[in-house]
Amino acid sequence: MITVHLIAAARPNFMKVAPLYHVLAESDWCSPIVVHTGQHYDANMSDRFFEELGLPTPDIHLGIGSGSHAEQTAGVITAYEAIILREKPDWVVVVGDVNSTMAVTLAAKKLHIPVAHLEAGLRSGDRTMPEEINRLVTDALADVLWTPSADADQNLIDEGVPEEKITNVGNIMIDSYELLRDQIENEKAPEKFGLAAQPYGVVTMHRPSNVDDRETLTLLTDHLCEVSRDIPLLFSLHPRTRKNLQEFNLLNLLTEAKGMNTTEPLSYIRFMGLVRSAKFLITDSGGVQEETSYLGIPCVTLRDTTERPVTISLGTNRLAKPDQIVECISEISAGTWPKGQCPPLWDGRTANRVADDLLKRSSDA
Ligand code: UD1
Ligand code: UDP
C-alpha cells in the first residue's frame, strides 16, 4: 500500500483532486490523503466544493489563508515541510498552478519525496502572471508530468524535460463534470435566477490584470453593462473582484445596471448548471475556458494570452480585449461563432489513466 498526499488549496483545485481521490480510494494499492493548504477558506470557495464533490474533510489542514505571494508561498512551504517530516508520504500529487502547487512541490522535493503534477505543461508565455511562475517552477521540479493536451507535452519537451516523465492523461476537470452530470442537469439553475425563459450569459473574472487595476476594471464594467442591456448576465463575483469593485466605487454601478445579476461565488453544481444552458461565457478563468469548450458553449476570454490554446484551436474559446466584448457577443447572437469540438482525451476517464500511470511508476520504482 502506498500513501499519496493529494494537495488541495484553492477553488480550481477541488474539481481536479476529487475524481482522482475517488479512484485511488477504491484501489487496493493506494491510500490517498487529502491535504488542504487553506489558500481558499470561505465556505463558498472551499467547503461547498468538498461536500458536492464527495471529498472527505481534509485529513490535514495547513490553514494558510491569504497574504502576499511571498507570505502565502513561504507559509505553505514551512507548514508542509513539517507534515512531510511527520508523515513521509510515498508520493505527493499537486494540481493546477496556484501558489500552493509550487510551494508544496518545493517543500517535498527538498526532502526527496517524489512529486507528480496533474495539469502539467501549460504555458501562457506571460511571466507577469503569477500562475506562469508557479507552472514553470513546479514542472521543473516534478518527477511526473501529467498533461491535459498535446501542446502541453510539446512545451515540456521544448524545455528539455525527458519524455519518460510525461504522460498525456487528458483533462481531469471533465471527470468532475461527468461525475456530477446528473445533479448538474437536475439543478434547474437558470430557473433559480429567473433566467430560464431567455438567452443569458455568465460572467466570472478574478485575474489581477483585469480586476486589480482601476482603469481596466472600470472599462470592463462599462462594457459588461452595455451587454446586459440587451442580454441578461449572471456575474459570479470572486472575493478579489468584489473587494476591488467596492474599492473603486463600481459595485453599485454594476449591481444596478439593467439586466445585470450579481451573486456570491456559486457552488460547482449550481455554477455548471448555469454554464451548460448559457448562450455564452465571459471570463478570465482557466477552468471555464475548458468547461465551455467541452460543452460547446461560446467563451469570450478577457486576456491577451492563454495557457490553454487547444480551447481556441479546437474548442469554442476566443481571446478578447475589453472593447471587443460587445462585438463578440453580436457574433455569438448572430450564430457565426465557431462550434468547436472536444479535445482528445477530455472524456471523463482521466483519473483512471492517472491512477494506472501512478501504479505503473510505483511498481517500476
Ligand atoms: C488564486 C490563484 C489563481 C486562481 C484563483 C482561483 C495564486 C497566485 N492565485 O487567486 O491562480 O485562478 O485562486 O479562484 O495562487 N479571498 C477571500 N476568501 C477566500 C479566498 C480569498 O476573501 O476564501 C480574498 C482575500 O482577500 C485574498 C484574495 O481573495 O487576499 C485573493 O486570494 P488568493 O488566493 O491570494 O488569490 P486569488 O485571486 O483567489
Ligand atoms: N466555479 C464555480 N463557481 C463559481 C465560479 C467558478 O464552481 O462561481 C468553478 C468552475 O468550475 C471553474 C472553477 O471553479 O472552472 C475554477 O475556478 P476559477 O475561475 O476560480 O480558477 P481558475 O480556473 O482561473 O484557476
Image: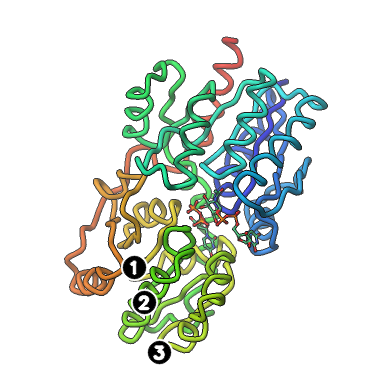
Q: Residue at x 33, y 71 (%)?
A: 279
Secondary structure under the numbered disc 1 in the rendered image: strand
The mark lying in front, picked from 3 and 1, is 3
The spot of residue 333 in percent (x, y) is: 23, 74
Secondary structure under the numbered disc 3 in the rendered image: loop
Q: Which residue is mark 2?
A: 224
Q: Residue at x 73, y 24 (%)?
A: 89
The mark lying in front, picked from 1 and 2, is 2
Mark closest to the chain's N terminus, 1 or 2: 2
Give amino acid for label 2.
Leu
**In the image, is 277 to the left or to the right of 310?**
right
Give amino acid for label 1.
Phe
In three-dimensional space, the C-alpha distance between marks 3 and 2, rounded to whole angstroms, equals 11 Å
Q: Nearer the viewer, residue 118 or 327?
A: 327
Residue 359's place in the image compared with 364, above or below, is below
Q: Nearer the viewer, residue 160 or 195?
A: 160
Identify the image quadrant of the C terminus. top right
The spot of residue 251 in percent (x, y) is: 52, 80
Residue 262's place in the image compared with 5, above or below, is below
Q: Which residue is mark 3?
A: 258
Mark closest to the chain's N terminus, 3 or 1: 3
Give amino acid for label 3.
Lys
Q: Which residue is mark 1?
A: 280
Mark closest to the chain's N terminus, 3 or 2: 2
